[in-house]
Amino acid sequence: MSGELLEIHDLAVSYHTKSRLIRAVDGVNLTVAAGQIVAVVGESGSGKSTTGHAAIGLLPRGGRVDAGRITFAGTDLTKLSERGWQAIRGAEIALVPQDPTVSLNPVRRIGDQVAEVLTIHRLATRRAAATDAVELLRRAGIDRPEARARQYPHELSGGLRQRVLIAIALAGQPKLIIADEPTSALDVTVQREILDHLEHLAVESNTAVLLITHDLGVAADRASKIVVMSDGGVVEVGPTREILAAPEQPYTRRLLAAAPSLSRTPLRPRRDTGSEVLVAAEGLSKSFSPHDGSVPRAVDDVTFTLTRGRTLALVGESGSGKTTTARMVVGLETPSAGKVTFDGHDLTRVDGEELRKLRRRFQLVYQNPYSSLNPRFNIEEVVSEPLRAFGLGGKAERRAKAAALIDQVALPASVLTRKPAELSGGQRQRAAIARALALNPDLVVCDEPVSALDVSVQAQILELLVRLQDELGLTYLFITHDLAVVREIADHVGVMRAGRLVELGPADEVLNHPRDEYTQALLASIPGQDWARSDS
């Protein structure tokens, strides 16, 4: 028998729908040894998740292995019956899925969901399983595991929910863990903790890990081998250091160039503060609870200025108050204290028609372009909606404006008649940017505008935002948890933690010489930094 624990040879997988056959994977070859972390890297649609799901027998409805062989510890998994899979899945091979929100049962306690794996595989009695579940939560790095076991998924943060999925994966003491984008929705510090834990498992328990990710920065730090996939096939494979130092294929080189975490230079030279203040936030505070001191303020005494034509990035983890601050800046939240001045107008004192006129001058681009675009509208209607809302132009003028805006964000005219669901994530975000530009705003607030996108699409959107800013003189308030993205686009940076602004200054100063320990921790958590340091 080969020394490899998992061997995939010439794998072909297709999805059968009512109207057509879709070949998702074709001719994939890869191997994973015990104790080894192998990263499968590629964009959405590359076939990486399909390959991982085939290896654990969890292809979605309509999915079928058409050809090839998947061998695990000498057993050909493609020949297993469903009963045979039940003996292996969870016990020998475990899956850590991407989204804990849909993977955990919302009406069952955490401890019960972990214990269920133990009882299903007859690894513990029902009474012992409850105790063992607490220990598994502890092994997964969860604080106060006894208390957490009694909680429901909605009572935990995203990072804790992801750790629960790891605990469930560990329950059967598997030889192989397939981690499918296990950290893509998490803050960088939480992401680092989760990946640290998976790496520790590989070393401590000789567990093999097949890490599926779109981020070469994550692969750079964690994997000993990288498999690069595109359009359902493997385009390049090799030791991590070799792939990153001298990629042979143009596609791999494009992925490397697009990864913000591996970039060391901004998309354009930084600019100084400038002289014309467009936005001034003074002592902004916001509390969502009675003023009894029992709950900390969501935003606490935040002060900054944003000058015309510049980009200020507000950075912080989930719950830091950055989005609430941005919503107060554009009048979508009323401050509990402090004020916001926009181009000389105190937004906390204006209302009615005066506020409506000012709102034409600032627009938002949200994190999820799918949920922020009306699914019933075609793209022409989506983009021209602000014009209709403010009664600007006739039907023909609005149509012409929508076409011009779509061209401005580098989308083909053919998308105008299509619905949002018919566009890719990157195309939808471009349409959302076009809509934000419809009223010729001075300020655009970008709230995590690229965090839901593949790194290559992310790079395209960031380049678009930089180009539009230069062409139109736009001012950006950029909200993100990712300092790698900040490095590429920001002129100035504010770092928020627990509602307070702990650091503020020019981007190069904050990124290269951070004063606050929290900023230092955020910078240290950027994926790819370990490899970048060793390569320099």
Image (cartoon, rainbow, N blue to C red):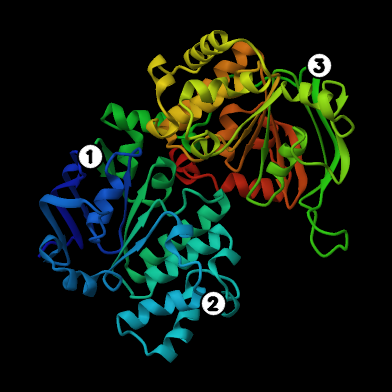
**Which of the 4 image quarters holds residue 279?**
top right
**Towards the viewer: 306 or 445:** 445
* Residue located 18% across and 69% down the image: 82
Q: Is residue 352 left or right of residue 93?
A: right
- Among numbered discs 1 and 2, the one appearing first in the sequence: 2
Residue marked by disc 2: 149
Query: Disc 3 residue type?
Result: Ser
Residue marked by disc 1: 232
Calculate the distance from the C-alpha at mark 1 to the C-alpha at mark 2.
40 Å
Q: Position of residue 361 (x, y in %)?
A: 72, 21
* Residue located 52% across and 33% down the image: 373
Q: Position of residue 280 (x, y in %)?
A: 83, 29
**Relative to 118, residue 350 above or below:** above
Residue 59 seen in the current view: yes
Calculate the distance from the C-alpha at mark 2 to the C-alpha at mark 3.
55 Å
**Towards the viewer: 81 or 371:** 371
- Quarter of the picture holding the N terminus: bottom left
Residue 226 seen in the current view: no
Residue marked by disc 3: 275
Q: Position of residue 197 (x, y in %)?
A: 46, 63
Calculate the distance from the C-alpha at mark 3 to the C-alpha at mark 1.
52 Å
- Among numbered discs 2 and 3, the one appearing first in the sequence: 2
* Residue located 51% across and 13% down the image: 408
- Crowding near the residue tagged with mark 1, few <14, some 14–19, many ≥20 C-alpha atoms within 10 Å: many
